[in-house]
Each structure stands twice: as structure tokens, then as C-alpha cells.
Amino acid sequence: MNRTSKLLTTLVVAGGMGLSFSAPSYAEEITLRMAVPDWPPTRIMKKLFDENYEAKSGNSVNLEFDFIPWPDYYTRLNASLTSGEQKYNMAVSDSQWLGAFIEGGYYRKLNDLIDADPELKTILDGMHQAPLQAYGTYPYKSENIYGFPQMPDILITYARTDVLCEASEQAAFMAKYSTKLPCTPEELDQMDWTMYGNIGEFFQRKKGDMLAGEPATDDFYGIAYQAGKGYDFSSMQINGFTWQHGAGIWDETNIPNAQAEGVVNSDLAVVALDRYLSLLKYMPPVVKTGSMDIFKTDELFREGKIAMNVQWIGFAESAINPETSKVANDVAFASMPGLRKADGRIDRSSNIGGQPFVIMTWTEGQEIIEAVDFVKWWLSSDIQHQFAAAGGQSAIKAVYNDPKYVTYRPWNRTWASGLEWQRDVWHIPQFFELLVQQQEQFDLAITGKQDAKTTLGNIASFQQRLLEDAGLIQ
């Protein structure tokens, strides 16, 4: 029996209506295997599954999590999928991988399952479009759904209140810049990149210099954000600067008319990259080594070596945990800084983080029924509230608009407004070639070996040739 026939047979036997199946006459042992990145949101998911999950089918469902360190995650998942071993039924995937793994035949299109299941369709209809499009659609923003949000994520500001709110620092900042040093979450929400740069300049201190009324025990810096050569680290931050300045990355939603040359390296894009680079001088020296990635900025913040960090919400739990953070009791969270426009409005356009669930094409029969039921359980209101209460985030409007949501964690106050600014990078199969070359070029600029104009010119030229060869640009 071929795969399609077996799936249809299962659906007919089960009633074929909306994947709402009656319990079988006998319980089966079903094991689903899921590849996941090893970080707090997936650890929380496992804990909630172990404590709460009961299969609607009546089967005994075991979900095996393969926790893989983030730096190795793409290469190990890619190796598994391309080897043909069919080890995993599901995965938590980055959105950038969708095109490559869909075209490779590994991620299953889900529209038929959604159309057949009114409950699942209602769940998706109640989601914010930014994460649903970023995590689920290929081509990007099409009607083709391949994923469900597992952990939506955005960049926000982490800030040291013990340093920012200290009276002598407040007075000295006012004397130097003739404006108040933002201290409260509400004040930090109004921070633009100019203020962020001023804070970076102001808080450059050497070991032994006075800091918040006491001698600094180590060199101290005001600010940090992603500037790492690895994976997508610098690109995720630079994309935000690009969009905020009115420039653009190559736009796959306009295939085949979208061009790279003249867009990726536009005059506005050069201004945006220069603005991004201009703040690096206020960051710890490690930024000039190409290793200032999300893990390093997280480490520096938790060790108390910087006043302010732009970071993913997914790392916030470790910042307020006394076991992992020296500053756990002195952290405030606010919206990410942005570019202040002429009308006073702050543009916070940013590259969305987070990941979707995907289901593999070889998951079929009772396994796919259980996989979809697991996803519906995960996206149910009760479990989404539990996830948020444990430090995760929800893309479901009814959950994050509930007044209880902002009480779960101090950073949740940034969530609803932050979603409105989110965009995504490319989903196409060529994403990895585009990303590797772009990251290498950005690193040359970050480490002072190349200016912004040359950097973006090289990126645009490479992307134009590659995308023309792939038939994506006419």
C-alpha cells in the first residue's frame, strides 16, 4: 500500500471527519520522535507534555525529544533528513529552512489536514498573521501552510535597573546629555537608537572606575546586540535597521520581479548599515572578533558586564533566574529601540525570531493523527497559558490579549505591541548560500575590514547572480 492510500484508509476507518477520532477498541503504543533545539522554550514544552498530555485517541503516546544544541541544530537536522534515515516524525524548525526542506521532500504540506479539521482551522484563524506567515507559509505569505508556531519570539531590551536608576548615574547623564537617563520599563519603551548610543557612550567604564556609586569590579559597557559571524546572528539585527531606514532585503514575495542589485545595496541600506556599525564602538571588545552572537551577549548581560542588551525573549528566563544570572533581581524589560521618524514615531521593524512545528512527509497513519492532536493540544488556550506562565510566548490573540498574560512574566508587557513590527527573512531553498555569504560580508564590516557600501555591494552582486541562476530573478 502506498503512503497516500494508507493515510486515506486510516482517515476512512476513523470516520474521516476533522481528525476528531473516536477512541479505538484497543489502545496502541505510539512513539513520536521530535528534533528540537536545546533551550528553555523546548524544555518547558517537554515538562508540560510529561505533566499534562493525554491523547484524545485513548492511545498511549510517547513523545521523544531529541535536544540538540542551537549551534549544531541546523547541520544535525539537515544531516538526518538528507541521509534518508527518517529518524524524526516532527521537528521544531527555523522558518528560514522551510523552502530547502520542503523542496527536499521532508516537510509535509498541512492544508488538507487543516481544511479537514474545523478545530485546527479555528486555532489558526485566531493567530497573529506575522508568526503564522513566518513560521508556516511557503512561498512566504502564500496560502500554503507547512508549520504551526511552537515558540514565537521577538527582540526586546534587557536593562539593568540598579545601574540605570542609580542617583549619581542619573545626575551625570542629565548633565552630559541634557535629558533623563531612561530607567523604568515605560521610559525604556521610548528609547530610540540615538538614546541607545548615548547610553553606550556614557557607560563605558574601566575596572576600578565608579559605577552606580561603587568601583567597577571589571570593565563595563553600556550596550550590546547581535554582531556574530555564525549562523544568522548579525543579519537578524541588521535586517531591522534596514527596514527601519526604509530600505529592504531581497523580497521573495515579488518573485520573479524582485531584484537584489539596487535594493540590497541602496543608498538607504548603506545608511542603515552604517548606523548599525556606528554603535559597535560602545560594545565589549569581543564584538570585533566576530563572536558577538546571541549567546555571548546573553552571557555578558547575566554576568553583569553590560547595562543593556537587545536580545530574544527566549533567553529572558535565564536573566531573572538567580542560579544563572548575577543580575537576576535588577532586570527590566522593554520594547526594542528603533529609529525615530520626523513625526516622533519610533519605527521598530524587526526580523521575527522563534520557530514552528513541522511534520515530516513520512509520518502517516496513526502517527500523523497523534502528531496533529499533539499540535492542537499545544495550541489550546489552557496549554498556551501554561507555557506563557512558565516563560514562553503565544501567537494566539485570545491568549496574549487576556489581562492575565502580562502578569506571567515582566517581558510580556512588550509582546502584543512588538508583534506588530515583525517581518521575516527569506524562506527559499537557497537561503543557506545567501546567508553564509551575507554573514561573511557583514563580519568584514563589523571587524573594520570593509565599509558599509562595499559590503552591501558585494552582497547584492552575489545575491543577484545566485538568484538569477536559480530562476528567481528575471
Image (cartoon, rainbow, N blue to C red):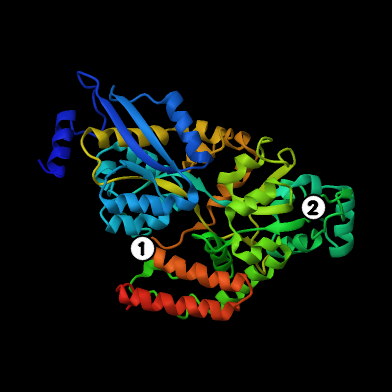
Q: Is residue 25 above or below residue 383?
A: above
Residue matched to label 1: 428
Whole-percent x, y for residue 173 in the image = 85, 58
| Quadrant housing the N terminus | top left
Q: Can residue 104 be seen here?
A: yes
Q: Which residue is farthest left?
A: 1
Disc 1 crowd, CA 10 A, few/some/many (<14, 14-19, 20+):
many
Please report whichever mark, 2 or 1, sits nearer to the chain's N-terminal start. Answer: 2
Q: Is residue 354 above or below residue 66?
A: below
Residue 218 badge: 2
Q: Which residue is farthest top?
A: 25
Q: Residue at x 32, y 34 (%)?
A: 32
Looking at the image, residue 412 sits to the left or right of residue 153; the answer is right
Type of amino acid under label 2 = Asp
Disc 2 crowd, CA 10 A, few/some/many (<14, 14-19, 20+):
few
| Quadrant housing the C terminus | bottom left
Disc 2 or disc 1, which is closer to the eye?
2
Residue 228 badge: none
Whole-percent x, y for residue 314 in the image = 55, 45
Disc 2/disc 1 C-alpha distance (Å): 45 Å
Q: Quadrant of residue 320?
A: top right
Q: Secondary structure at mark 1?
A: loop
Type of amino acid under label 1 = Ile
Looking at the image, residue 363 sits to the left or right of residue 311; the answer is left
Q: Is residue 206 above or below residue 453?
A: above
Whole-percent x, y for residue 20 in the image = 26, 30
Q: Residue at x 65, y 49 (%)?
A: 299
Whole-percent x, y for residue 17 in the image = 21, 33
Residue toward you, 26 or 385: 26
Q: Can residue 382 be seen here?
A: no
Residue toward you, 244 or 156: 156
Q: Is residue 281 above or below residue 30?
A: below
